[in-house]
Amino acid sequence: MLSSTKEYLQALRDGKYLLFLQWPKFIAEYYGKNDKNQEADEMVNLIIFEWLNNGFCEEDIKKFAILYAVHEMESRPLREGLSYALTTISIALFPCMVYSTNNLQKHYISSKKLSGKEVIQLMAMNNAYLEKRQFVELLGQEQDKFFTWVKEADSSAVYKAFDQIYSVTYLKYLIEDYLNLLESAHLPNDQLKSSRISLIIRLAKYFNEQTELTQDVLDEIAVYVKKLWEMQPAEFEEEFLKKISPLPFIDNTVRILTGLGARFFSILQPPSPPLNINSEVNKNPKV
């Protein structure tokens, strides 16, 4: 996690979208809140305040429009917590646009550090600069402007962002599906099942902290997957492992020979559940 709103906004401007989507969680922790229990309106106001006090600009809107366009793709590259973070930020974006367009931004800027409660009070007090009906009308205008930018966003920029995001989230969802299926699988004679589950949980925790698919990350995933291969995975698990981290030729040959030996000396093999790993995650998504 980064250490300031300024850094998260720089991540947005640099196109590091998954890193940027950690921003609401940072704000919740910064103000001593639990984002799961935080009132939605309060969280939105904290984001508005932080954004206005850290250089809100048109570039932010256009970058966020690219991210929003990715979110709306049919393949759903952003789901659950990531989708919720994006939605929360988008709700905060529109008032920021209203205040910026109408030169009201200065009323929401503070030179001193405020508590969460003080921020909420400041936002409520300064909302008096616009009548409610006028604010709603201006909000609608800014929303129309934003969604026009989403529609007209440069396709190459959108697909570049999609590739960057989905390279990470595809594996994230694949690992989650693998874990869920293994936990529910009936493998009564599999003495290593619980050990594999424990290792996959560690892999999922590690990967959920990643926002870019670097070579170091790929190497770390490969270490986990190699260990899982050594723990006699069920046949349905092998398809997951191949997709999560394809093995080099030599390691693959050793795995095949080891697997054949294990099956040869096995008297009973418990039935494996049907493979259905493409129900949620499609490696070749329709975008």
Image (cartoon, helix red, strand yellow):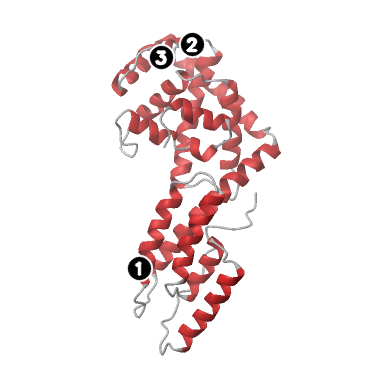
For discs 2 and 3, the disc positioned in front in the rendered view? 2
Looking at marks 3 and 1 on the same chain, the residue that comes earlier in the sequence is marked by 3
Q: Which residue is under mark 1?
A: 195
**Of helix, strand and loop, which one carries label 2?**
loop
Residue linked to disc 3: 127
| Residue at x 32% of width, y 17% of height | 121
Of 223 and 7, the residue lying toward us: 223
User: Is residue 223 visible to us here?
Assistant: yes
Tally of numbered tags = 3
Q: Nearer the viewer, mark 2 or mark 1?
A: 1
Q: Is residue 2 above or below residue 184?
A: above
Q: Quadrant where the N terminus lies?
A: top left
Three-letter amino acid code at disc 3?
Asn
3D distance between C-alphas at marks 2 and 1: 58 Å
Q: Tell me the residue at 54%/32% (across/down).
A: 12
CA–CA distance in space, label 2 to label 3: 10 Å
Residue 76 in view in this figure: no
Specify whether 2 is left or right of 279.
left
Q: Position of residue 238 (x, y in %)?
A: 51, 71
Observer-nearest residue: 248 or 52? 248
For badge 2, the amino acid type reads Leu
Residue 39 lies, in percent from the top left, at 33, 32
- Rendering quarter of residue 68: top right
2 or 3: tag closer to the N-terminus: 2
**Which image quarter: residue 153?**
top right
> In this picture, is 275 found above or below 63?
below
Instruction: From the top left corner, tell me how far across and down residue 98 is, in percent.
Output: 52, 18
- Residue denoted by label 2: 104
Q: Position of residue 80 (x, y in %)?
A: 45, 47
